[in-house]
């Protein structure tokens, strides 16, 4: 970096740093560390969801500095990359719970079908009733499924993959924030059922929340995320397209 | 730890390769999770280093969603166009999905275990 001559050294340093991956990687970790510390201070309250708070902090910084998301991602991609091996690593808690999973194979299959269809069909029906366009309805259908599967489904049924990516993330954050409280109020207290619901309705972000509850909850969330993704990929492409003309007619 | 991480990445690579080759709708990492699970079954469980590496990756799983989550910024204008139907559909369907999945699993599991104890 050249020495600054006259005027605004802080601005020049910013101009230099802003183009470097280091700045955005560091800010991603700092934002998460702050969000995590806040959640600790609030004794793990789910409303202080670390994804929600870190995203809000970073979005504020990006908007305030006029930084394009693509430049931010040049730094953040190093964190993003670890999502792949971390998803693979979910096999370890899954293995630890294999006996409990086998014992509950029947109930798991029923909960998979009921929960997946309830989330997808209610999203379509409500959006249609409130006058959403067919493309928006189709984009909402796979919203509980992990992002790559959801985007693939959306494209196949006439949705907008980029809109799906947003609603998937928002669904995950919402599910992680309200999930355990809602289920407790409904009398669902066992970690396996809470974890399964979080993974099925709120995919990876819900699974991350479930892992904070217990290893059992995390394993059932990982299972639900995998099964829910596969189930949606197999059923939604032939279930939703015939529905769309009926729904959009109203 | 490096060997364990290499194993996880091999599973992911195998998953990504199969997903592309067979044009499967399931993403590579989710297939990789299945491959690692099968590997663990075949080996009779994870080694200590694999267990520790998995715990390390999963301990701060929420962090790994932050970069993608910040991408919401790119699409705010799309949400604004049909904000009401999207917001209501998103909130109600997420709550309903959570409730239906949690209640059915808890209810059928209980019914099953009480049927077992009666026998």
Image (cartoon, rainbow, N blue to C red):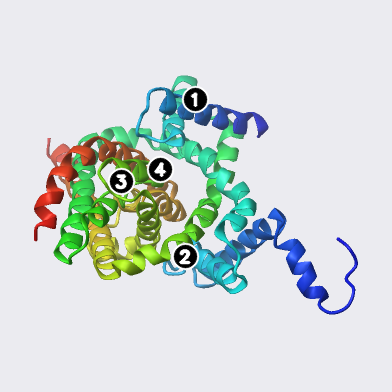
C-alpha distance separating marks 1 and 3 = 25 Å
Return the residue nearer the eye: A250 or B11: A250
C-alpha distance separating marks 2 and 1 = 32 Å
Query: What residue would you read off at disc 4?
Result: A148
Q: Are marks 1 and 3 on the same chain?
A: no
Query: What residue would you read off at disc 2?
Result: A52
Query: What residue would you read off at disc 1?
Result: B14
* Of marks 4 and 1, the one in the foreground: 4
Quadrant assignment for the C terminus of chain B: top left
Given the image, what chain letter belongs to the residue carrying mark 1?
Answer: B
Please state the horizontal and vertical placement of residue A137, each as a whole percent of the image. Answer: 23, 55
- Secondary structure type for disc 4: helix
Residue B98 sits in quarter: bottom left
Which residue: 23% across, 47% down?
A: A116
Please state the horizontal and vertical placement of residue A141, each as a whole percent of the image. Answer: 25, 51
Q: Residues within 10 Å of mark 1 (few under 14, many from 20)?
A: some
Chain-order first, disc 4 or disc 3: 4
C-alpha distance separating marks 4 and 1 = 17 Å
Q: Are marks 2 and 3 on the same chain?
A: yes
Quadrant assignment for the N terminus of chain B: top right
Please state the horizontal and vertical placement of residue A24, each as a whole percent of the image. Answer: 65, 59
Query: What residue would you read off at disc 3?
Result: A154
Q: Are marks 4 and 1 in contact (CB under 8 Å)?
A: no
Task: Give the total of numbered labels.
Answer: 4
In-image side of A176 versus A233 (left or right):
right
């Amino acid at each position: 970096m050249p020495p600054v001559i006259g005027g605004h050294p802080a601005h020049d340093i910013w101009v230099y740093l802003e183009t470097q991956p280091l700045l955005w990687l560091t800010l991603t970790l700092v934002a998460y560390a702050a969000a995590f510390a806040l959640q600790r201070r609030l004794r793990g309250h789910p409303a202080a969801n670390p994804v929600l708070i870190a995203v809000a902090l970073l979005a504020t910084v990006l908007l305030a500095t006029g930084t394009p998301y693509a430049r931010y991602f040049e730094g953040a991609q190093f964190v993003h990359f670890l999502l792949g091996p971390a998803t693979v690593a979910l096999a370890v808690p899954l293995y630890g719970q294999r006996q409990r999973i086998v014992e509950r194979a029947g109930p798991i299959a029923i909960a998979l079908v009921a929960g997946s269809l309830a989330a997808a069909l209610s999203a379509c029906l409500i959006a249609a009733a409130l006058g959403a366009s067919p493309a928006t309805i189709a984009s909402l259908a796979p919203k509980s499924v992990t992002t790559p599967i959801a985007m693939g489904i959306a494209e196949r049924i006439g949705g907008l993959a980029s809109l799906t990516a947003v609603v998937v993330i928002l669904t995950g954050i919402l599910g992680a924030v309200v999930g355990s409280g809602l289920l407790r109020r409904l009398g669902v207290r066992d970690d396996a059922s809470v974890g399964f619901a979080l993974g099925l309705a709120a995919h990876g972000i819900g699974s991350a929340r479930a892992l904070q509850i217990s290893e059992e909850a995390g394993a059932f969330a990982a299972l639900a995320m995998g099964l829910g993704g596969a189930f949606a990929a197999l059923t939604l492409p032939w279930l939703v397209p015939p529905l769309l003309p009926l729904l959009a007619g109203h | 730890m490096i060997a364990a991480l290499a194993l996880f990445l091999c599973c992911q690579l195998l998953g990504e390769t199969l997903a592309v080759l067979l044009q499967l709708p399931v993403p590579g990492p989710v297939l990789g999770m299945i491959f690692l699970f099968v590997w663990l079954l075949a080996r009779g469980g994870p080694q200590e280093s694999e267990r520790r590496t998995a715990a390390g990756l999963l301990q701060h799983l929420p962090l790994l969603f932050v970069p993608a989550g910040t991408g919401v910024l790119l699409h705010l204008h799309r949400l604004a166009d049909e904000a009401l139907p999207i917001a209501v559909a998103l909130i109600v369907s997420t709550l309903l999905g959570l409730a239906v999945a949690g209640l059915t699993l808890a209810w059928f599991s209980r019914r099953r275990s009480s049927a077992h104890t009666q026998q």
